[in-house]
Image (cartoon, coloured by chain):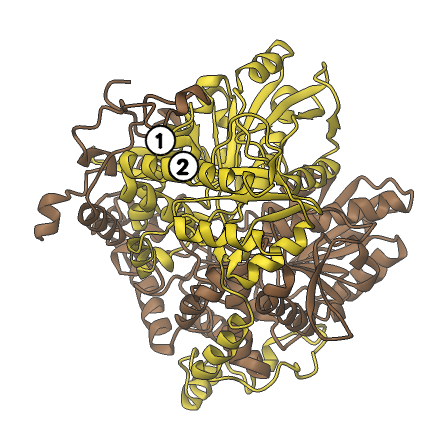
């Protein structure tokens, strides 16, 4: 409480240094003669204790998995082993400069090699690049490779097929590479509609991008037909691996017919999400696309089993990262995979069980748009409680001590709540979450005002997002500016 | 390790509740089943630690005189103590603002710091790394000007150029040899890859006369503590690598891409942006704003496909800048500058001719009297990573405040040995 007296929650870090005029004494090293020096730098000078208290106070106004269940659909907010944080901070790795000569970076290269081998086994793909810094960059790399592949074949393909349940990144990625998106709607079981797909596919389609299981939480049931039709037209099949947490050891995307895929290393393989990154977005491909992967690639010399960086691939797409990708996230992924070994199938099995169990507990409370077993997550609709009910119920969950699920996604379900409990939550927690959702549903009928104003227990109440976008205040400015 | 809480009894109960005998019944028949994965026996936490430690031991730990986009600045201890707090570490992207005020405020502070350092109006809440931040800026410039060319001044980090070429191929943008009517933007790295500092004003004016945007690319942003900010020199966008601000080198990643722009470009920015607003009682709070730019709403019409980026590292950078303040950051910059110039003199007297033209900050390129690779190998044996071999007779050398005078003397002795 003493801390709060000194650091009121209203303070920005800039408010602690009242003497900050920003003006500085220049030419301390005779630099002025060398290049144009700055004479104004209004960064506050603050004591270390004030900094610690300020950010500790901020942390107390934040909810994380450590605080409680975080059932954000499509985000895989599982518990991530703490030991991985220690491992990523070992001086032998954290202190490694990326330009250390390969003979002196054998441990780091071995980590990358071993991880690639493990990911090949998990997905069935033939080769991996660990360069993409996130799933969306993995996707971008995949589509760039597809574009180059068809350009080299002398084919001009202009379209990419994406189901209407897909994440927004898929069409955004297609657009970045100047492809036109063709949206195929979902059928009554939540699969990509086969009839719609037949109409959409053609010789000008470069890629079909499918998330499996899809964002409705269902395994695609028509993949075999989709694969056959795609092959007939020479189209590449891309798997958005955002939901790989439902497939570890259960099924391999390459065996489902996919030619390429990305993995969200942070989600599936245990890097804490950090409030929005850093992540990792490894891209896996089948052998006929391997030569296009970015450089440098990790190679192992047969002669002496040493590892090296190889830049000599004529057909390589180039590069998508300043260095080799997010090494720290690769390290955590390798440690996680090693800790599970072949038992990693338990992760996906428990994720499936938890999602189906929770769905069973709340299916009568909400509308269930598709009546079938789900994979690792599911979507329900709150439409019976009226407009904005998904938002209001989500905000009310905060008062009950739960982080809300994903809301209003996928776009094809009205008033959607998308719930992914993950494998690390206990039955008791799921029971409590279901109880809270039922209680909130009762409130929605009996005392809807309670929901409209929620949350009621947080330091700041419902925030005005419209005002934020209309009257942009995106930074602190020094008083004299 | 026990990362799944269920006992056998729990599992039976839960299966019974959903009327299933096995979990496999939850997977449709159409999904092809995998054979048991060959990933070895599970390891205990203790075994994982010794396995990973044994890999770490295969790396050579050295004093670092290499830069080239990854810098060995000192990292204050307090940073990891704060970022490891579970409320920050284990949170997701702050979509639910009321449950995420801490991270949102920290990102607002981050955006403010980036604007103050670069002299720009608006910053986003981070991008992946320096190279892709530059590529995103080029995509923005194309979208804003509707032109398809990009002019790159000499001195851009070759890896950044390679990333730029890859993005450009994907986006049907071409690299132009001249500044002409097709050019959407002009890129200049300051300090350049060889460490040299040019006054960006001339290039900015040239770009603007041509109707192009001017992008300033920053490799080591500690330089901004003493250099005139690019915003004052006419930059329309500033992108760069923020790894210098309290983030470990970590074999090149994760690092921190930053991007700041003039206010006219705000609605074209990629990535997350945090804004201040109010709740019903008029109390200040923070939210993700201008989300109509973003892929999850705008889909194929989004400004970028980016989603997750580098929030925890933006937090690290914020805490770094808070801990150092203007005094500390300027001291880092001055010390790095002085050390680099001292080492340059020491090497000069040992026959290493400086190639970097004109003034430099903390990096300089030298011509080596013998093979650069041999020299690096020799220095490794003295416990020193001596720089980056740019080609067989050129070495890019860097100093930070961590490179002490005794280390420099070891370096000098190392290169003198026959």
Kind of element beneath mark 2? helix
Q: Colour of chain A?
A: brown
- Relative image position of residue A300 (x, y in whole percent): 72, 69
The total number of labels drawn is 2
In-image side of A427 versus B371 (left or right): left
Q: Is residue A368 visible?
A: no
- Relative image position of residue B125 (x, y in whole percent): 43, 39
Quarter holding residue B114:
top left
In-image side of B287 versus B21 (left or right): left
- Relative image position of residue B47 (x, y in whole percent): 48, 83
Q: Nearer the viewer, residue A106 or B212?
A: A106
Q: Residue at x 51, y 74 (%)?
A: B52
Q: Is residue B55 visible?
A: yes
In-image side of A394 versus A191 (left or right): left
Task: Give the letter of the chain under mark 2.
Answer: B
Q: Which chain is yellow?
A: B
Q: Residue at x 27, y 23 (%)?
A: A25
- Relative image position of residue A157 (x, y in whole percent): 84, 42
Dot 2 corresponds to which residue?
B338
Q: Residue at x 32, y 61 (%)?
A: B86
Residue neighbourhood size for the residue with mark 2, other residues' Cα within 10 Å, grouped as few (<14), some (14–19), many (≥20):
some
The C terminus of chain A, quarter of image: top left
């Amino acid at each position: 409480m003493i801390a709060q007296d000194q650091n009121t929650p209203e303070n920005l870090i800039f408010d602690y240094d009242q003497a900050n005029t920003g003006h500085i004494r220049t030419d301390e090293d005779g630099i002025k003669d060398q290049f144009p020096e700055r004479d104004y730098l209004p960064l506050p000078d603050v004591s270390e204790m004030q900094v610690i208290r300020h950010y500790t106070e901020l942390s107390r106004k934040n909810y994380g998995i450590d605080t409680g269940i975080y059932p954000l659909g499509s985000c895989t907010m599982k518990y991530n082993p703490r030991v991985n944080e220690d491992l990523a901070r070992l001086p032998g790795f954290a202190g490694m400069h990326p330009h250390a000569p390969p003979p002196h970076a054998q441990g780091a290269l071995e980590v990358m090699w071993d991880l690639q081998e493990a990911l090949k086994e998990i997905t069935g793909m033939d080769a991996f690049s660990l360069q993409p810094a996130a799933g969306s960059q993995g996707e971008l790399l995949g589509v760039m490779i597809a574009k180059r592949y068809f350009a080299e074949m002398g084919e001009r393909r202009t379209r990419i097929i994406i189901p209407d349940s897909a994440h927004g990144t898929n069409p955004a990625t297609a657009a970045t590479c100047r492809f036109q998106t063709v949206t195929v709607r979902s059928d009554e079981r939540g699969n990509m509609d086969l009839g719609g797909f037949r109409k959409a596919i053609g010789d000008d389609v470069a890629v079909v991008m499918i998330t499996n299981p899809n964002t409705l939480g269902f395994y695609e049931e028509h993949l075999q037909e989709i694969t056959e039709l795609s092959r007939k037209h020479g189209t590449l099949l891309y798997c958005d691996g955002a939901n790989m947490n439902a497939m570890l050891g259960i099924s391999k995307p390459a065996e489902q017919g996919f030619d390429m895929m990305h993995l969200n290393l942070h989600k599936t393989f245990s890097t804490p999400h950090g409030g929005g990154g850093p992540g990792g977005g490894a891209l896996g491909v089948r052998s006929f696309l391997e030569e296009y992967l970015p450089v440098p690639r990790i190679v192992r010399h047969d002669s002496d089993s040493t590892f090296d960086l190889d830049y000599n691939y004529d057909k390589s797409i180039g590069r998508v990262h300043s260095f080799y990708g997010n090494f720290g996230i690769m390290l955590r992924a390798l440690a996680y995979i090693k800790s599970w070994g072949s038992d990693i199938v338990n992760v996906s099995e428990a994720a499936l069980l938890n999602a189906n169990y929770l769905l069973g507990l709340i299916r009568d409370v909400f509308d269930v748009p598709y009546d079938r077993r789900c994979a690792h997550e599911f979507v329900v609709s709150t439409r019976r409680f009226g407009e904005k009910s998904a938002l209001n119920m989500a905000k009310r969950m905060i008062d009950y001590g739960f982080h809300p699920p994903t809301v209003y996604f996928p776009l094809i379900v009205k008033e959607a709540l998308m719930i992914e409990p993950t494998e690390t939550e206990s039955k008791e927690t799921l029971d409590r979450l279901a109880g809270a959702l039922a209680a909130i549903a009762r409130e929605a009928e009996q005392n809807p005002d309670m929901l409209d104003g929620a949350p009621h227990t947080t330091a700041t109440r419902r925030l005005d997002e419209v005002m934020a976008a209309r009257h942009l205040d995106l930074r602190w400015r020094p008083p004299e500016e | 390790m026990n990362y799944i809480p269920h006992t056998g009894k729990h599992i039976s109960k839960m299966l019974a509740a959903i009327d299933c005998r096995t979990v496999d019944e939850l997977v449709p028949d159409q999904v092809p089943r995998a054979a048991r994965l060959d990933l070895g026996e599970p390891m205990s936490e203790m075994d994982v630690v010794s396995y990973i430690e044994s890999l770490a031991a295969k790396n050579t730990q050295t004093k670092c005189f290499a830069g080239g986009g990854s810098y060995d600045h000192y990292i204050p201890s307090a940073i990891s103590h704060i970022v490891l707090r579970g409320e920050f570490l284990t949170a997701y992207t702050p979509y639910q603002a009321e449950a995420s005020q801490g991270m949102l405020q920290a990102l607002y502070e981050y955006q403010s710091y980036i604007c103050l350092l670069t002299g720009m109006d608006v910053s986003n809440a981070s991008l992946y790394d320096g190279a892709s931040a530059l590529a995103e800026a080029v995509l923005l410039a194309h979208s804003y000007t509707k032109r398809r060319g990009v002019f790159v001044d000499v001195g851009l980090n070759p890896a950044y150029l390679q990333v730029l070429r890859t993005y450009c191929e994907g986006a049907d943008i071409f690299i132009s040899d001249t500044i002409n009517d097709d050019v959407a933007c002009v890129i200049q790295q300051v300090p350049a890859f060889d460490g040299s500092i040019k006054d960006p004003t001339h290039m900015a004016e040239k770009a603007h006369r041509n109707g192009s945007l001017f992008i300033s690319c920053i490799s080591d942003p500690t330089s901004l503590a003493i250099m005139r900010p690019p915003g004052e020199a006419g930059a329309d966008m500033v992108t760069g690598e923020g790894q210098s601000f309290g983030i470990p080198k970590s074999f090149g990643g994760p690092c921190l891409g930053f991007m700041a722009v003039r206010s006219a470009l705000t609605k074209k920015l990629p990535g997350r942006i945090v804004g201040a607003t109010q709740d019903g009682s008029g109390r200040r709070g923070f939210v993700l704003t201008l989300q109509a730019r973003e892929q999850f709403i705008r889909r194929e019409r989004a400004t970028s496909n980016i989603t997750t980026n580098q929030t925890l590292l933006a937090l690290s950078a914020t805490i770094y800048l808070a801990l150092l303040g203007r005094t500390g950051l300027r001291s880092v910059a001055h010390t790095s500058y002085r050390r680099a110039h001292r080492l340059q003199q020491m090497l000069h007297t040992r026959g290493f001719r400086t190639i970097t033209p004109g003034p430099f900050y903390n990096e300089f390129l030298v011509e080596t009297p013998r093979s650069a690779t041999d020299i690096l190998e020799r220095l490794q044996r003295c416990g020193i990573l001596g720089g980056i071999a740019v080609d067989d007779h050129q070495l890019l050398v860097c100093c930070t405040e961590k490179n002490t005078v005794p280390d420099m003397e070891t370096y000098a002795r190392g290169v003198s040995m026959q």
